[in-house]
């Protein structure tokens, strides 16, 4: 019995369509898997335009499918509850974030591990209008796949001789490290800006508070 195909084998067999297949099911929370398949397609001689476009389409279809599952009550079925049980500690947090920041949550929540599954389903379960949810999820997919997929594709092509000399595992570890650092930097900047905004809002509220 043969195991599941590796990302390299998918890229060799399917070409750019491998990005569509992987992105449809990838909800890892970091752009590592999408980046890995883009590197693999790059090394297999695929087209950057088709790779990124199909990856974006796959990510969008995956998100919209999860939204429709939530909208039809699928998240409350016994099977779905068992499937989502490992994400139970995140559920209340995801629900609170979605209620307070619905637009930002659907567009950028996929960067939080597990939220890429929960947030679209919760949006459907909460009855968010389909047009709004589709727009936000599509924009989120564009902002997720296009920059990371393009970067990974051209990194693979730019350093092709070095990449081919490494083992498959080393390629993915190196790519994961690079993208993890980039995500960490971006996350730290977002958190810093959020703290500054909260401090500014608190200062403004204190100035408006009437004296006792």
Image (cartoon, rainbow, N blue to C red):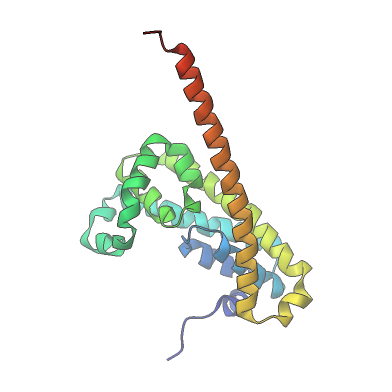
Residue depicted at x 73% and y 82%: 165
Q: Is residue 93 above or below residue 174?
A: above
Q: Is 123 on the left or on the right of 146, as rendered?
A: left
**Residue positioned most to the top:** 211
Q: Is 27 on the left or on the right of 127, as rendered?
A: right
Q: Is 202 on the left or on the right of 94, as rendered?
A: right
Residue depicted at x 32% and y 54%: 89
Q: Is residue 211 above or below residue 35?
A: above
x then y, percent, for residue 31:
56, 59
Residue depicted at x 45% and y 43%: 105
The quarter of the displayed image where residue 181 is located: bottom right
Q: Is residue 203 above or below residue 78?
A: above
**Residue positioned most to the bottom:** 1
- Say how many tags the image has: 0
**Residue positioned most to the left:** 78
x then y, percent, for residue 127:
32, 40
Please indicate, yes or no, whether residue 164 appears anywhere in the rendered image. Answer: yes
Q: Is residue 163 above or below residue 140?
A: below
Report the quarter where the N terminus lies. bottom left
x then y, percent, for residue 163:
72, 75
The quarter of the displayed image where residue 34 is located: bottom right
């Amino acid at each position: 019995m043969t195991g599941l195909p590796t990302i390299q084998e998918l890229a060799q067999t399917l070409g750019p369509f491998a990005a569509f297949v992987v992105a449809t099911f990838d909800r890892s929370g970091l752009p590592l898997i999408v980046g890995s398949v883009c590197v693999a397609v790059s090394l297999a001689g695929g087209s950057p335009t088709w790779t990124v476009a199909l990856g974006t389409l796959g990510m969008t279809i995956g998100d919209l499918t999860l939204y429709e599952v939530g909208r039809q009550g699928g998240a409350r079925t016994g099977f779905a509850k068992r499937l989502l049980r490992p994400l139970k500690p995140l559920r209340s947090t995801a629900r609170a974030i979605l209620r307070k920041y619905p637009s930002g949550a659907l567009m950028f929540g996929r960067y939080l591990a597990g939220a890429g599954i929960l947030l679209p389903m919760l949006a459907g379960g909460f009855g968010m209008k389909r047009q709004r949810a589709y727009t936000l999820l599509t924009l989120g997919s564009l902002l997720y796949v296009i920059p990371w997929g393009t970067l990974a594709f051209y990194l693979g092509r730019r350093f092709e001789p070095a990449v081919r000399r490494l083992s498959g595992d080393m390629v993915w570890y190196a790519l994961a490290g690079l993208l993890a650092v980039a995500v960490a930097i971006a996350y730290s900047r977002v958190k810093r800006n959020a703290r500054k905004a909260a401090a500014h809002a608190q200062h403004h509220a204190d100035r408006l508070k009437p004296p006792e």
